Image (cartoon, rainbow, N blue to C red):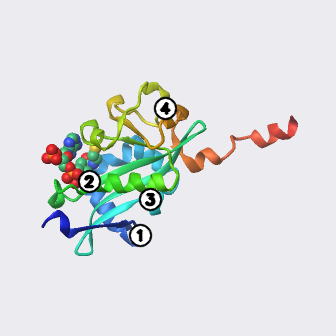
Amino acid sequence: MTPADVTFAPELAAHDPIIEEINAEAFGPGRFSRAAYHIREGGPHRRDLSFVALVDGEVVASVLMTPIAAGQGRALLLGPLAVRPAYKNLGIGRKLVAIALDAARADGWALSILVGDAPYYAPLGFSRVVPYGQLIMPRPVDPRRLLACELTPGALDDFIGEVTHADLAKKPAKGAEKLKAAE
Ligand SMILES: CC(C)(COP(=O)(O)OP(=O)(O)OC[C@H]1O[C@@H](n2cnc3c(N)ncnc32)[C@H](O)[C@@H]1OP(=O)(O)O)[C@@H](O)C(=O)NCCC(=O)NCCS
């Protein structure tokens, strides 16, 4: 088994069950209580910007990209990223992140955010969101684990406030239409 035996492809709906299995194996039931999981529950991820690694046609790793919003800013939430234990330390995780970021850039995205281990993601272009208070996550997050990768320099400056799935940000606030009509 060498890195040359691994291929990478955009995620398909047919991969859903195995991706769920890989994430359950990597993160356990605790994954359901995480801030990033809560945000992802708000709407669909971008399948065309999410990728799997395959060995002999079997999915062995996956990374998801989900559109998110904070204030006027938009970004892609990277994760979960998980590699099957038997395939770790072959560079698969790093390659999946690089492919997903390249696809995001090509699709016009300026920013990617994640909650994860800085020592792993720093060499891939992510750094800590400073000040931490710039973003309000739906559940508590260790500030050292809230990371951003600017695909366009300065993109983080516009990403301020409550972080939600981008689909929820599109919806007008309750009663906003009535108020508008009364203006
Ligand atoms: C973290 C994970 C995605 C890495 O995938 P991988 O394909 O094994 O990693 P790569 O082969 O790309 O990189 C391996 C390197 O990353 C390091 N590394 C792995 N996990 C790390 C972590 N959490 N923090 C810091 N470094 C880490 C390895 O020690 C190795 O270092 P080396 O190149 O100096 O030997 C994988 O171990 C995994 O699925 N873990 C469980 C789920 C998880 O924690 N995902 C989110 C990561 S925050």
Residue for badge 3: 49
Circle 1: residue type: Leu
Residue 62, picture quadrant? bottom left
Front in this rendered view, residue 97 or 80: 97
The mark nearer the N terminus, 1 or 2, is 1
Q: Quadrant of residue 71?
A: top right
Whole-number angstrom distance, CA of label 2 to CA of label 3: 15 Å
Q: Amino acid at mark 2?
A: Gly
**Mark whose residue sits in front, 4 or 2:** 2
Measuring from the top left, give residue 107's x and y in whole percent. 51, 56
Q: Amino acid at mark 3?
A: Leu
- Mark 4 → mark 2, Cα distance in angstroms: 27 Å
What residue would you read off at disc 2?
93
Give the labeled residue for mark 1: 12
Q: Secondary structure at mark 1?
A: loop
Classify residue 121 as left or right of residue 175. left
